[in-house]
């Protein structure tokens, strides 16, 4: 298994001989305005350039879109990704949106989706606290994660945009993943707090899955994500977790 951090939640995963592009956001730096109602609204997104050429990012067998918010699936991705490639979506609503962009091979993830001998299992998450969902549920929307399973690979859990909650806890107990990718940038909506994991959420996952290796993603690339890699690394050192949690820079790969 190889995980390559690209930018924000965009990553490239090599697993059981297949290559997956995760949550592609392919626009140039500063292409989009800040997200409305979020912290650091004076900044434009993405905050940084892509670390590798587009051609290298698109050299994949399939794409997984955990949800269709602009920081996970953007206009540039719709234009640049070949229309015949297999794309996995979380539900019919997202699948319809992806098909409307011209993509011809869109599959909805289930609890038992097979791709070239790899089992992909859709998991649930929650894009913010109960309070945030009660007030802005329509805007925050449904999100998913994915379990990757193959007899010759470690079990991988891509948690997606979620905070630490019962869904994540249940997923850890049910699937016992060896490797966990967490969106850890602590993205903030003003007045409602975090809508993805921050350092305390990472701590909870470490406690709940003491044998797993964790990879921190979704950092330092969008205006509303406030947790820096340095701050997370310092926190991990203070809590004796720096050996268990990998915090890759954009363009850096982790082989597991």
Image: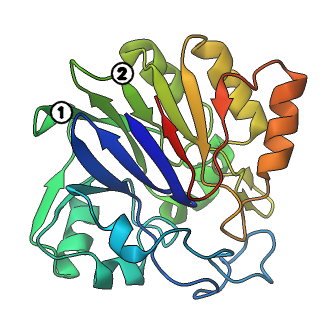
Q: Quadrant of the N terminus?
A: top left
Residue tagged 1:
118
Q: Position of residue 214 (x, y in %)?
A: 58, 29
For image coordinates 45% across by 19% down, the residue present is 178
| 203 up-or-down from 124: above or below | above
Front residue of 121 and 26: 26
| 3 up-or-down from 147: above or below | below
* Mark 1 nearby-residue class (10 Å; few <14, some 14–19, many ≥20): many
Query: For the residue labelled by badge 1, is the local secondary structure a helix, a strand or a loop?
Result: strand
Q: What is the spatial separation of the Cα atoms under label 2 and label 1, in whole angstroms?
A: 12 Å
Query: For the residue labelled by badge 2, is the local secondary structure a helix, a strand or a loop?
Result: loop
Residue 126 showing in the rendered view? no
Q: Position of residue 94 (x, y in %)?
A: 28, 64
Q: Position of residue 162 (x, y in %)?
A: 55, 43
* Mark 2 nearby-residue class (10 Å; few <14, some 14–19, many ≥20): some
| 24 up-or-down from 194: above or below | below
């Amino acid at each position: 298994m190889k995980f390559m951090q690209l930018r924000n939640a965009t990553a490239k995963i090599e697993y059981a001989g297949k290559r997956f592009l995760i949550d592609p956001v392919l626009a140039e730096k500063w292409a989009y305005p800040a997200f409305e109602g979020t912290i650091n609204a004076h900044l434009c997104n993405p905050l940084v350039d892509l670390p590798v050429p587009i051609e290298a990012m698109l050299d994949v067998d399939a794409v997984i879109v955990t949800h269709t918010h602009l920081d996970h699936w953007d206009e540039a991705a719709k234009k640049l990704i070949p229309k015949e490639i297999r794309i996995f979506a979380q539900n019919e609503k997202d699948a319809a949106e992806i098909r409307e962009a011209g993509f011809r091979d869109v599959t909805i993830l289930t609890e038992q989706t097979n791709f070239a001998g790899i089992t992909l299992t859709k998991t649930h998450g929650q894009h913010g606290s109960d309070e945030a969902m009660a007030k802005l549920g329509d805007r925050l929307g449904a999100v998913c994660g994915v379990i990757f399973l193959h007899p010759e690979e470690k079990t991988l859990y891509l948690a997606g945009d979620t905070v630490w909650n019962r869904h994540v806890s249940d997923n850890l107990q049910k699937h016992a993943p060896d490797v966990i990718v967490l969106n850890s940038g602590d993205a903030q909506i003003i007045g409602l707090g975090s809508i993805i994991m921050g350092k305390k959420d990472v701590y909870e996952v470490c406690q709940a899955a003491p044998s797993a290796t964790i990879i921190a993603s979704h950092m330092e690339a969008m205006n509303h994500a406030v947790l820096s890699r340095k701050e997370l690394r310092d926190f991990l050192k203070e809590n004796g977790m720096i050996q268990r949690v990998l915090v890759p820079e954009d363009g850096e790969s982790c082989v597991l």
